[in-house]
Image (cartoon, rainbow, N blue to C red):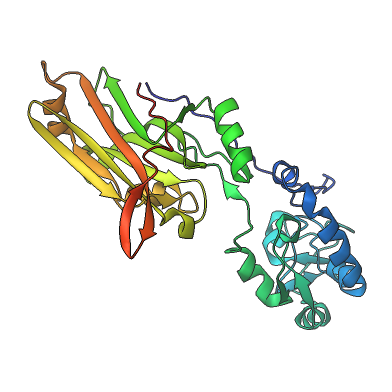
Amino acid sequence: MDLDSMDCTSTIDLTDDEEIHQDRHSYASVSKHHSTNNNNANTASGLFPTTTSVHELLECPVCTNSMYPPIHQCQNGHTICSSCKNRVHNRCPTCRQELGDIRCLALEKVAESLELPCKYMSLGCPEIFPYYSKLEHETVCDFRPYNCPYAGSECSVMGDIPFLVSHLRDDHKVDMHSGCTFNHRYVKSNPREVENATWMLTVFHCFGEYFCLHFEAFQLGTAPVYMAFLRFMGDETEARSYNYSLEVGGYGRKLIWEGTPRSVRDSHRKVRDSHDGLIIQRNIALFFSGGDRKELKLRVTGRIWKEQQQGGVEARGGGGACIPNLS
């Protein structure tokens, strides 16, 4: 049941003789879901005519990202960001002259006076920031794209939730289910092969939202364990509106976990390493499996519910809103 690894990453090795061209940061997959924001982007661009031209001067010719101090320049005045200076082997990508250690202090000063919109403006962010504060905001912007939640490979795809759901289904062949209850059976012929093995990702559509159920085997210290946990496909504040339970057992014994799903803003590894889920030690898992204890057979059941405030009392809602899908 192991998932084949998919490598979606790419690297660029720049040499002296290569032309340096790289597309600007784009999230085409996201923009097609946000076409209604184009008018906002066009309106905003008219508000910053001079800022836009200065902003182009602050764009690194290699990575096309905005440059921050130290900004380097060659003797002919061509600029480059500090990250790319080493990538081009200390040689100007424009005129091929040696870069040396010349700082472009004038451009750094100009940058201090700028105010620019967030780069996720086309996705709905209305904020405007001083140049040197903009980068910090963009790392936590609520409108920034989500990373692919698939854990079977280091997938670099980004997008909004509808796009990622399609991506998981079409590209990673992830199982999709409708409903807020689940009943899954995991079987593995050799339970000793647990070294960082990602086994299963299932996506559930429930309460109009999407949830990722992870089940995997990995080493916890020197002990092999199995772990199941749920992630919410949205931001952390929305994730807190939901709870979930997981249960595994056999032969009159059971383990139960109940908690709040983590947002997919938190990486799969971060959630796993925080042990925020149902953890099953291998000897217990084999006990639940029965037989000669040489084959893993686990049945994990659970459900998702939404907390609703009704007269100050929390109620588990959605009983009639979800269609169970048992497999």
Q: Is residue 298 above or below residue 264?
A: above
Q: In the current view of this chain or complex, which residue is farthest to the left?
A: 252
State left or right for residue 138 relative to residue 313.
Answer: right
The answer to which of 16 and 137 lies nearer the viewer is 137
State left or right for residue 229 relative to residue 14.
Answer: left
Q: Is residue 20 above or below residue 299?
A: below
Q: Answer whether residue 232 is visible to the viewer in this image.
A: yes
The image quarter containing residue 42 is bottom right
State left or right for residue 257 relative to residue 141.
Answer: left
The image quarter containing residue 96 is bottom right
Q: Answer whether residue 220 is visible to the viewer in this image.
A: no
Image quarter hosting the C terminus? top left
**Residue 65: image x %, image y %?**
74, 60
Image quarter hosting the N terminus? top left
Q: Residue at x 66, y 68 (%)?
A: 135
Q: Residue at x 22, y 36 (%)?
A: 247
Q: Residue at x 16, y 39 (%)?
A: 255
